[in-house]
């Protein structure tokens, strides 16, 4: 039985600005895996709302990050990377990525400048050819390209594949060009009231965000040993009398051997994961957290509709 709190912990509040001179819009950030989408969204928001890992396919569900630029409120949708899906979970992630772009006011296509246009990026171009919303191409990781002539050649190649409203060259990691991109997007958003409060940074439920923080630390420490056959769920969130929270999470793996890897010798690995995840959760929650992690083997969790609901994904049928 999952303990449901009386009030779901959240980071979003009531919108505050409804003036006629305000702007607000949703911007889908699309790209191949490991193009740097989550890093870019975090940089645009100015806070960590999406987990980051050097492993591909880290983002599993669309995450909304909220930023302000002048009188414009920008809602960035950090989508899972586009790739050739093979498993059921893969299909759910790619479907979620395209779903995040359907109703957006603008689409940012992020391209790894060092890698160029791969098959996944070419597919994004093809599917967006007839899209009516503004389309902005963003070349990321330009600091890794020593010969700048290659960047110009890449832009020319992109222009032959699809027409973009604007092209930016940035480094999401060090912030180069990010402010210029943010300013441009603010001007292109439709006029209208803000959807979120002025100090909101995401509308992701805190329980889900906390689970993502723990999953990030698992990827950090076990990126070589543990494949993508793990997920994390926040099963209990209780606010205590001193305003701190008791948080219980379950790490699901597919085999007993994977459970041993997560636990580590004498429990050393899971203790390290728990300590780092607790600090990350406290930072976003704004108060003290008592984190308790449990590891369970569930060989077919990737085919369990309940696990997909917990992740905020649609369960794809065979």
Image: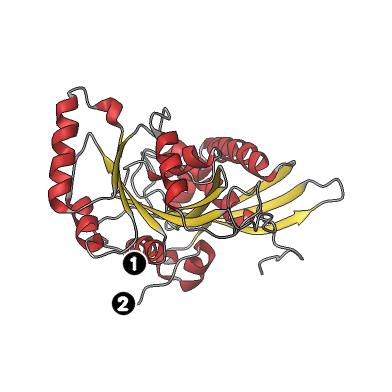
Identify which residue is drawn at 57% across, 39% down.
Answer: 267
- Name the residue tied to disc 2: 318
Identify which residue is drawn at 74% across, 42% down.
Answer: 287
Residue 82 visible somewhere in the drawing? yes
Contact, mark 2 vs mark 1 (Cβ under 8 Å)? yes
Q: Looking at the image, is 225 positioned above or below residue 130?
A: above
In which quarter of the view is residue 254 placed?
bottom left
Identify which residue is drawn at 48% across, 37% down.
Answer: 43
Residue 250 position in % (x across, y down): 58, 55
Q: Earlier in the sequence, mark 2 or mark 1?
A: 1
Name the quadrant of the N terminus: bottom right
23 left or right, relative to 249: left
Identify which residue is drawn at 60% across, 38% down.
Answer: 271
Q: Residues within 10 Å of mark 1 (few under 14, many from 20)?
A: some
Assign a secondary structure to mark 2: loop
Q: Front-most of 204 and 181? A: 181
Residue 232 position in % (x across, y down): 53, 54
Q: Looking at the image, is 191 positioned above or below residue 145?
A: below
Q: Looking at the image, is 315 positioned above or below residue 77?
A: below
């Amino acid at each position: 039985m999952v303990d449901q709190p009386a009030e779901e912990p959240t980071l979003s509040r009531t919108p505050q600005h409804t003036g006629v001179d305000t702007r607000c819009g949703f911007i889908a950030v699309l790209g191949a895996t490991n193009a740097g989408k989550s890093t870019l969204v975090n940089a645009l928001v100015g806070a960590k709302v999406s987990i980051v890992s050097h492993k591909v396919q880290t983002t599993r569900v669309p995450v909304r990050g909220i930023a302000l630029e002048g009188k414009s409120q920008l809602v960035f949708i950090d989508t899972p990377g586009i790739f050739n899906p093979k498993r059921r979970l893969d299909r759910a992630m790619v479907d979620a990525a395209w779903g995040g772009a359907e109703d957006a006011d603008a689409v940012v296509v992020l391209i790894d400048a060092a890698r160029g246009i791969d098959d996944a990026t070419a597919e994004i171009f093809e599917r967006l050819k007839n899209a009516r919303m503004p389309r902005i191409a963003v070349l990321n990781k330009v600091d890794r390209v020593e010969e700048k002539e290659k960047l110009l050649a890449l832009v020319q190649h992109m222009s032959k594949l699809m027409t973009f409203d604007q092209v930016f060259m940035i480094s999401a990691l060090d912030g180069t060009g990010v402010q210029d991109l943010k300013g441009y997007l603010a001007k292109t958003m439709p006029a209208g009231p803000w959807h979120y409060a002025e100090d909101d940074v995401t509308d992701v439920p805190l329980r889900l965000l906390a689970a993502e923080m723990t999953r990030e630390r698992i990827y950090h420490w076990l990126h070589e040993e543990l494949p993508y056959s793990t997920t994390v769920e926040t099963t209990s969130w209780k606010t205590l009398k001193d305003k701190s929270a008791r948080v219980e999470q379950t790490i699901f793996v597919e085999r007993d051997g994977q459970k041993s890897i997560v636990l580590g010798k004498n429990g050393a690995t899971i203790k390290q994961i728990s300590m780092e995840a607790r600090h990350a959760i406290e930072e976003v929650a704004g108060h003290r957290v008592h984190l308790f992690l449990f590891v369970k083997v569930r060989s077919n969790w990737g085919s369990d509709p309940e696990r997909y609901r917990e992740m905020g994904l649609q369960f794809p049928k065979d």
